[in-house]
């Protein structure tokens, strides 16, 4: 599996560079596992006993944008096929995982469920059932990525949970099995689980991935206009264009990254944009304002409502970030950014 690190290595090498891993020898000193905490977020999770009482992992789960999203057809099972390029951005959730007597979760955002409806716990239970283990874990989530934004925050959290608990529980689930679990959780979960952390071309329903040996040479300003767009609604209501000839996104993005060929930017259309803009004028306005601030290109990400702009100049990107962050949640990503 492309970009997958071996899970048999118990050190942090080969795993996400933000993981902090504590040896299981600490658990063998006769100290009981902690029960699930009631704190509001992972920043407080077991702070006093982190180095003494248990194995502990902390990690950042980064968001993504879609550079182009072309819906190419609909399968007999109802799923739509697509082609897109995933690109990571510097907007992330923070998760911690600690050994516990049961599976439980705390979340800093009370608008999100922290029960079995949360993708983190769905991922944890799917992994535990697959491995046949009875281990528990206390999962703490500080939610920074807006949800319902088309940035893949929930999918990134789910992928991070699979990676972290595979190590915490020392269960050595192979990459192919992790992929199968990831696809069942969400079509874009494999991107956060398997790739090398940079650009990736996705096809199928989004689960067929190819790492692209390049990175975006632009500053990226990503803005969340505050509208929560349902992906299910977007797929039901977008305006199909199945008959068109689909451009070669892989070749186009390589020309963009390696040669800075700005002439290819118009091919990176998002098929959700027309319907989202028709129903959410405020989202359209953010795209227009990004272009007014000097973006070379601006687009909806995923099914929205987040919109991003690509900037050639650092000063223009910084100014746009300042303007938008006064009104909306926003992030600024440097050129050539990678998740790991």
Image (cartoon, rainbow, N blue to C red):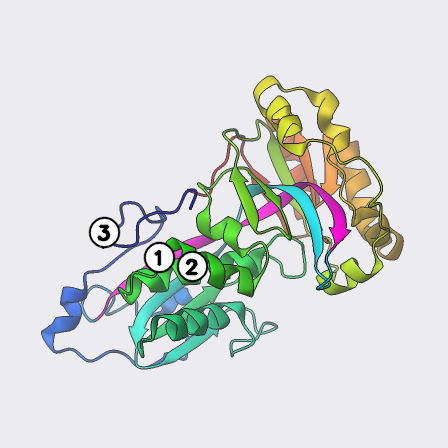
Q: Is residue 151 left or right of residue 107?
A: right
Q: Within the image, what quadrant is residue 290 found in?
A: top right
Q: Within the image, what quadrant is residue 30 found in?
A: bottom left
User: Quick one: quadrant of the C terminus?
Assistant: top left
Please report contact status of discs 1 and 3: CB closer than 8 Å, yes or no. Answer: no
Residue 2 pos. (x, y %): 43, 42
Residue under numbered circle 3:
11
Cα–Cα span, label 1 and label 3: 17 Å
Residue 4 in the image: above or below residue 153: above
Q: Is residue 250 left or right of residue 119?
A: right
Residue under numbered circle 2:
178
Q: Is residue 309 left or right of residue 17?
A: right
Cα–Cα span, label 2 and label 1: 6 Å
Find the residue positioned furthest to the left: 29
Residue 183 pos. (x, y %): 54, 60
Return the mark for residue 38.
Answer: none
**Does residue 305 show up magenta in the picture?**
no
Residue under numbered circle 1:
174
Q: Residue at x 61, y 17 (%)?
A: 259
Cα–Cα span, label 2 and label 3: 20 Å
Pick the front one: 183 or 40: 183
Please report contact status of discs 2 and 1: CB closer than 8 Å, yes or no. Answer: yes
* Of the two numbered discs 2 and 3 in the rendering, the one whose residue sits closer to the viewer: 2
Residue 239 pos. (x, y %): 86, 51
- Report the span colored magenta: 54-74
């Amino acid at each position: 599996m492309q970009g997958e690190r071996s899970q048999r290595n118990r050190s942090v090498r080969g795993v996400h560079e933000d993981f902090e891993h504590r040896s299981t020898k600490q658990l063998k000193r006769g100290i009981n596992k902690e029960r699930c905490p009631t704190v509001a977020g992972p920043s407080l999770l077991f702070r006093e006993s982190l180095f003494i009482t248990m194995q502990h992992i902390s990690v950042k789960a980064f968001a993504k944008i879609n550079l182009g999203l072309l819906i190419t057809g609909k399968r007999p099972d109802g799923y739509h096929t697509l082609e897109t390029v995933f690109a990571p951005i510097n907007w992330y959730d923070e998760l911690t995982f600690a050994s516990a007597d049961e599976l439980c979760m705390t979340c800093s955002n009370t608008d999100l469920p922290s029960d079995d409806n949360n993708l983190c716990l769905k991922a944890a239970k799917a992994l535990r059932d697959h491995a046949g283990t009875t281990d528990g874990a206390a999962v703490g989530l500080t939610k920074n990525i807006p949800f319902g934004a088309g940035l893949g925050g929930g999918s990134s959290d789910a992928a991070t949970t699979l990676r972290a608990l595979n190590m915490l529980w020392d269960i050595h689930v192979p990459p192919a099995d992790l992929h199968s679990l990831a696809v069942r959780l969400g079509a874009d979960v494999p991107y956060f689980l398997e790739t090398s952390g940079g650009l990736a071309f996705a096809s199928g329903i989004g689960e067929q991935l190819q790492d692209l040996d390049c990175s975006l040479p632009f500053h990226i300003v990503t803005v969340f206009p505050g509208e929560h767009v349902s992906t299910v609604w977007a797929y039901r209501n977008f305006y199909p264009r199945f008959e068109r000839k689909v451009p070669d996104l892989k070749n186009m993005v390589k020309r963009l990254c390696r040669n800075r060929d700005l002439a290819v930017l118009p091919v990176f259309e998002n098929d959700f944009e027309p319907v989202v803009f028709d129903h959410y004028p405020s989202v359209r306005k953010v795209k227009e304002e990004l272009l007014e601030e000097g973006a070379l290109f601006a687009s909806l990400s995923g099914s929205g409502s987040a919109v991003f702009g690509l900037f050639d100049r650092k000063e223009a990107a910084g100014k746009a970030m300042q303007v938008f962050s006064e009104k909306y949640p926003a992030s600024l990503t440097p050129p050539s950014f990678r998740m790991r």
